[in-house]
Each structure stands twice: as C-alpha cells, then as structure tokens.
Amino acid sequence: MKKIKFILLAMLAMMTTATFVACSDDDDDNNVSNMQRYQNEVDQVVKAQKKNSKAILLVAFGSTWQQAYDAFDQTRAEYERAFSGYDVYLSFSSAICINRARAAENTTARSFYEPKYWLEAFGRVQYEEIIVQSMQVIPGEEFSRVVNAMKDFGNNSNGDLDDKYMANVTLKLGMPLMYTEADAATLADALDENFSKYAQQGAMTFMGHGNPDEYDTYKANVRYTQLETALQKINKNYFVGTVDMADNFKVQVRERMEQAGLTKGYVYCAPLMSIAGDHAHNDMAGDDDAWNNGFELNDDGEVEDTSWKMYFQHMGYSIDQNTFKDNGTDALVKGLLEYQNVRNIYKQHTRQAEVVDFYHSMYPEE
C-alpha cells in the first residue's frame, strides 16, 4: 500500500512539474522583454531590406513632430540616391522620443529604434562595411551616445556575433555638422545663402541647443561661438544663441546685439537644429510669456518660460509673425535638414567618414 501511495505521489509530482513547465513556456512566449522584441523587429527590417554589402545608419536625437519626420524621410531618401551601393537606415538615440513616437504623441504612430539594435542587426546579417553618420549639430552629449553605441558594437558587447566577422568588418563614423572650427565656417557660408536677406533687414538670430556646462562633452559648446564669429565676418547682424549653453541664452544674445548697436528694428529667429521640433516650435516660436512689467532672470541669467519671439518683442524689437511659422515663403521655423546645402554638408561628412577600430583596440593581438 505504501509503495502504491509513493508511486501515485511521484506521478502527481511529475504532472505538477509538467504543468509548471508548460505554464512557464507560455509565459516566455507572451512576455518577451521589450529589448528582445525591439531587436526582433529590427532584425526583420534589416533582413527584408538588405540589398547591398554596405550600410549607412543615420543617427538623430529624434522628435515627435511630423515636420521632423518629413525632414528625416527626405534626408534618408537623398542618401539612398547619393550612396547607391549602401542600404540606408534611420535611428533615434532618444528613448523618450522613441516612446512618444510610438504613442503617436503629435502625429501618427511610428517605430524608431536606438542605434544598438540596428548595429546588432547589421552584425547578424554581416554587412562588410557600416558607416554611422551622426546627425547632431555639435559633437556634444548626444554625439557621445552615438560613439558609445559603436564601441559596444565594436566590442561585441552581446557576445553573440562571429569573432572572425568582427575582426574584419569596416566600421566608420561620420562626424556631426560642426565637428571642427573649419566646419563652423563651412556652415556659416551655407546659412548665409539661406538667410542673407533677413540679416540685411535686421538681426538674424539662430537658436541652437547647446550643452549645460556639466555635460559639455568634448567641450563642443565653443562651436556656437565660432559659428557666430564666422557669420559676423559675413554680416554683423548674425547672432547665435542656445537654450542650454551657459552665458549664451537669448538674454546674452540681446546684450551682444545692443553692444553692436542693434537696439531696435526687426529680429528674425531660426532654429540651429537638424529638425524643427519642440524647441523650435515652443522655446523659439511659441507664445510662452512670463512678462510681468519686466522679466526676472534665473540663477543662470536666463528668462524662463518665455519664447525667443515673445522675449525680443517685449524688449522693444519688431517681430514679423510670418517668419515664426513652419510653412510659407518667409517661414523660418525649419530644421537644418530642410535646407539642401546643409544636407550636402552632412553627406560630405559621410564621404569623409573615419574608420574606427574598437575590436582591435580591445584585441590588439589580432
């Protein structure tokens, strides 16, 4: 009797274990991690679109604005025409932008992915050459994310790519728009082609992003100062400010304008960013206004909760409302990628992309 009881208990245990195993398998199928799901999705895209042995990955910070999506799509299409031997893909480095784009924050839902997923997928299909083109304006904090993604890929951080392939793949990096001081001078010429008529009528100001001092990676903020210097060699009415660089907010831009004798007249503003998104539409051209018979400066010397448009208007300058729109002949709320001559500079940086060798820096004996 005890033997029969023991056998029955053993059988019950086996049935229970089988039940648990089956439930666990179902859970695994239904609860794949987001990281694995994203990787699977990117893998499918790359496998379906791979036509060449070489790839270009355009890496932007990201956005949730349709105007920005249109600029990215136009840029990618232009890259496909200019680099016929390459498959071209687009990536966002900002998780916030990726999540909000998926949630259709400002337009229809779209799926974007971080560079790490694309690079991993490229390694799985074994592209022989990979160019990662930074779509940043300066080599700052966001550019460092691009570099770090390439380092992780080059060092095979997931440990699942073929070592022989990793030892032989050609990995290149295309630099941001203003990687060097010479790049700032090149961009100044391009901007003057696009904005000279405004600089002839009043102060033509550009709003870049910039890095806070504690995040001024590669000391890249200096490029904005160098750009203003290069622009003012062309026309003294050009000025360059930022939303995050200390001592170069809109307040300091106005101070420099006054020092140059521009105390009244028209002020024109354009974003110095690859696309026109939240900063362009809100911080620059928006209607946020903290005016209360005067402005109060914060500890950094900036006026908070007030757009560039409203600030300059309260400071006594004239504003052409038509220029603070994103469509029309005189509209200036456009990202840099919406200008052909600026896209040409990015493409030239891609042609001059530098080889990086993170694999051999980790395995010098190879």
Image (cartoon, rainbow, N blue to C red):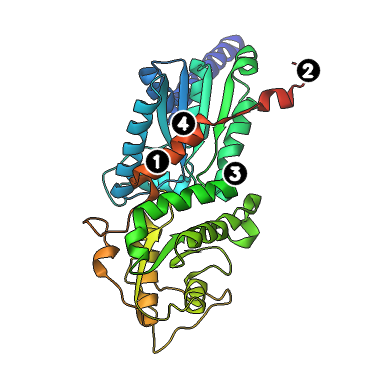
Toward the front, the furthest residue is 234
Q: Element at badge 4?
A: strand
Label 1 vs label 4, nearer the camera: 1
Amino acid type at circle 2 is Glu
Question: Which residue is pictured at 49% across the width and 32% down the height?
Answer: 350
Toward the bottom, the furthest residue is 293
Please give the label number shown on residue 343. 1
Q: Quadrant of residue 157?
A: top right
* Disc nearer the start of the sequence (1/4): 4
Question: Which residue is pictured at 35% across the width and 42% down the height?
Answer: 340
Residue 11: % across, % down: 52, 13
Q: Element at badge 2?
A: loop
Please give the label number shown on residue 144. 3
* Disc nearer the start of the sequence (1/3): 3
Label 1 vs label 3, nearer the camera: 1
The CA distance from mark 1 to mark 3 is 21 Å
The CA distance from mark 1 to mark 2 is 40 Å
Query: Residue tagged by mark 2?
Result: 365
Label 1 vs label 2, nearer the camera: 1
Residue 317: % across, % down: 35, 79
Q: Element at badge 1?
A: helix
* Disc nearer the start of the sequence (4/3): 4
How busy is the neighbourhood of tag 4: few (under 14 within 10 Å), some, or many (20 plus)?
A: many
Query: Residue tagged by mark 4?
Result: 57
Amino acid type at circle 3 is Ser
